Image (tube, rainbow, N blue to C red):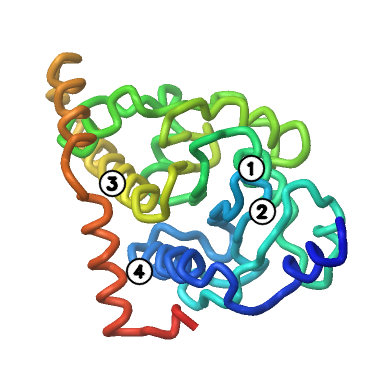
Amino acid sequence: MNPAQTAILDSPGMDFEQERIALACAFRWTARFDMHESVANHFSLAVDEAGTKFLMNPRGRHFSRIKASELLLLDAEDEQIVERPDAPDPTAWALHGAIHRRVRHARCVLHVHSRYATALACLADPTLPPVDLNAMRFWGRVTIDADLDGMGLDDEAERIARLVGDKPILVLRNHGVMAIGETVARTFDDLYYFERACSTYITALQTGRELAIVSDRVAAKTAQQWRDYPNFSEDHFRELQAILDRDDPSYRR
C-alpha cells in the first residue's frame, strides 16, 4: 500500500460523508428495533468500485452510540489492518471483506443475530415459508448456509462469500442472518422486513396450529409485486433518518 492510500485509510475525518451518515442511521435503528446483539454484530458499506474499500463499525461499540465519523475505512486486501491500534473485529473484517470482494451487488452488508431470524436459523429446516405478505417478499430470494464451521475467519469467510449468489438474504445456520444489497436503504429495508416475516412465522408456529401456506404461484406473484413497488425502501429509510434528525441527530457527527 502506498503512503497516500495509508493516509486515506487512517483518516478519522468525514470522507464519504453521506455514506457514513446513512450507515450510522442503520446502526441506530437496528438498536431501536432491538435487532442488535451487544457489540457483536457488524455492518459494512463498500466505497470503491472493486468493493475492497469499505466502511465498518469499530470494535466494541454499541449500535445505539455509533456516529458517522467513527466508522472505520478498511481495505479488504490489507491484512495489516488487524494489527492497527484501532483494528476492527477480525471475524467481521474477514467475512465482510470476502463478500465485498466476491459479490458484485454486495455494496452493503448487514449482519445481525436478531431474535426471530436467528430462531429460524436454528431450526432443522430454516426455510421461510410464504405465510404472510412479508414472507412472500423473500420467496426465491434467500440463500441458506447449512454448514457452519466456526466464527467466520479465513476459509470460512471465503466459503460463505461464495454462497451468496444474487440473493439479498443469507441465513447462516446456527448463527444469524445477513442482508446484502446495493444501497443502505434497500439492504436495511430487507433486513427489517425479513425479521418481521420471521417474527410472524415463529409466532404462528408457537400456536401449534396448522399453517396457511400460499401456493408457489401466489408467493412468486407477490414477491414480484414487492420488487415492482416504487421507492418503498427509499421512502422507509428517508423517514427513519427524519425521525433520528428530530430525536437524536448525533448519529450524523
- The secondary structure type at the circle numbered 1 is loop
CB under 8 Å between callouts 2 and 1? yes
Q: Name the residue under label 3.
A: 193
Residue 245 picture location, percent across and down: 31, 81
Label 4's element?
helix
Q: Mark 4 points at which residue?
A: 32
What element does badge 2 sit on? strand
Q: Distance between the residues labelled 2 and 1?
A: 8 Å
Q: Residue drawn at (54%, 54%), measured in percent from left and top?
A: 45
Name the residue that disc number 2 marks: 53
Look at the picture and state if 240 lies above or below 131: below
Residue drawn at 52 percent across, 32 percent down? 173
Which one is earlier in the sequence, the residue at label 1 or at label 4? 4
Q: In this view, does 125 lie to the left or right of 52?
A: left
Question: Of the residues shown, which amino acid type is indicated by label 2?
Answer: Lys
Q: How crowded is mark 4: few (under 14 residues within 10 Å), some or many (20 or more)?
A: few
Q: Badge 2: how crowded within 10 Å, few (<14), some, or many (20+)?
A: many
